[in-house]
């Protein structure tokens, strides 16, 4: 397997915030049960879900933690699009001492109030293997660390960078959207997360993943990567 394949699988995972969770049904023993779920990566890069205790998939996981989560590229021809299946075990998350809730609410702020008024809890999926299909001849089993990459920044570092971008660089984030062929219109993009490979912008409830040209593992490297993106965006919109 090439680094290019691993990077493509990671890029697909990083650009996704929703997928199909398949659990083992209690109602129909032995049959898979699929549900649409939202997720956000924790600091180790593993997907975290916020699910209700009364949901069918939660009851299934409580009885048997084995499950899978599939994410796909957007588009009309599902057979031609990239897709990634994470196969593993789910576990409840004890949020004490962790920033999983903060990371989830940064991506889905509407979930904070919803969480307080319903019987919801965080669950983490720990993949054993991942199956990536990126097109004809690009079919691979991958290790977890290859795709679910740990964030090199601690919560305080990431929070400072995100807050700075949201407070002082609104125009730059709009330019990042246009660089990806998206006109934000009247929507002001909001940065929700930064890691070594890129940053997440939220356009209301839509996730736009902005990738860096090279990994940025220090705040200074992130600053340079974001400045380079802004310069590229300005150059792209300048008349020839």
Image (cartoon, rainbow, N blue to C red):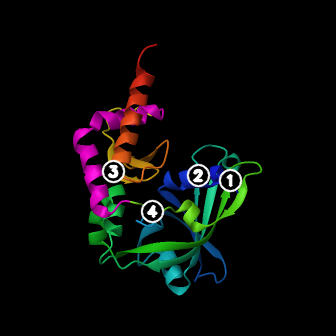
Q: SS at mark 1?
A: loop
**Highlighted range, magenta:** 153-181
Residue lying farthest to the right in this orientation? 137
Identify the element where label 2 is drawn.
Answer: helix
Along the line of sight, which residue is nearer the eye, 239 or 54? 239
Is label 2 in contact with label 3 (beta carbons under 8 Å)? Answer: no
Q: Give the residue drawn at x 58%, y 74%.
A: 88
Please report the residue visible at 44 percent of the width from the left and 48 percent of the height from the top. 198
Check the image and name the residue furthest to the top: 240
Residue 179 rendering spot, x and y as whole percentages:
45, 32
Q: Earlier in the sequence, mark 2 or mark 4?
A: 2
Label annotation for residue 39: 4
Foreground residue among 68 and 1? 1
> Mostly what secondary structure, the magenta segment?
helix
Which label sits in the foreground, 2 or 3? 3
Rendered image: mark on residue 101 = none
Q: Nearer the viewer, residue 24 or 131?
A: 131
Q: Which mark is residue 2?
A: 1
182 on left or right of 186: right
């Amino acid at each position: 397997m090439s680094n290019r394949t691993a990077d493509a699988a990671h890029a697909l995972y990083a650009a996704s915030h929703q997928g199909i969770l398949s659990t083992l049904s209690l109602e129909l023993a032995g049959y898979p049960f699929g549900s649409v779920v939202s997720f956000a990566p924790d600091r180790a890069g593993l997907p975290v879900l916020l699910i209700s205790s009364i949901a069918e998939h939660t009851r299934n996981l409580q009885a048997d933690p084995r499950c899978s989560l599939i994410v796909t590229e957007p588009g009309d021809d599902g057979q031609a699009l990239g897709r990634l299946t994470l196969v593993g075990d789910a576990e409840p998350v004890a949020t004490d001492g962790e920033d999983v809730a903060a990371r989830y609410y940064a991506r889905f702020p509407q979930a904070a109030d919803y969480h307080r008024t319903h019987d919801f809890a965080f669950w983490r999926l720990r993949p054993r293997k991942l199956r990536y299909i990126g097109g004809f001849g690009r079919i691979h089993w991958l290790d977890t660390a290859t795709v679910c990459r740990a964030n090199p920044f601690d919560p305080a570092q990431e929070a400072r960078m995100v807050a700075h971008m949201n407070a002082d660089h609104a125009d730059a984030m709009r330019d990042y959207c246009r660089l990806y062929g998206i006109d934000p219109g009247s929507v002001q993009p909001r940065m929700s997360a930064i890691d070594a490979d890129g940053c997440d912008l939220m356009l209301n409830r839509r996730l736009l993943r902005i990738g860096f040209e090279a990994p940025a593992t220090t705040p200074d490297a992130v600053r340079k990567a974001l400045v380079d993106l802004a310069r590229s965006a300005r150059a792209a919109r300048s008349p020839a």
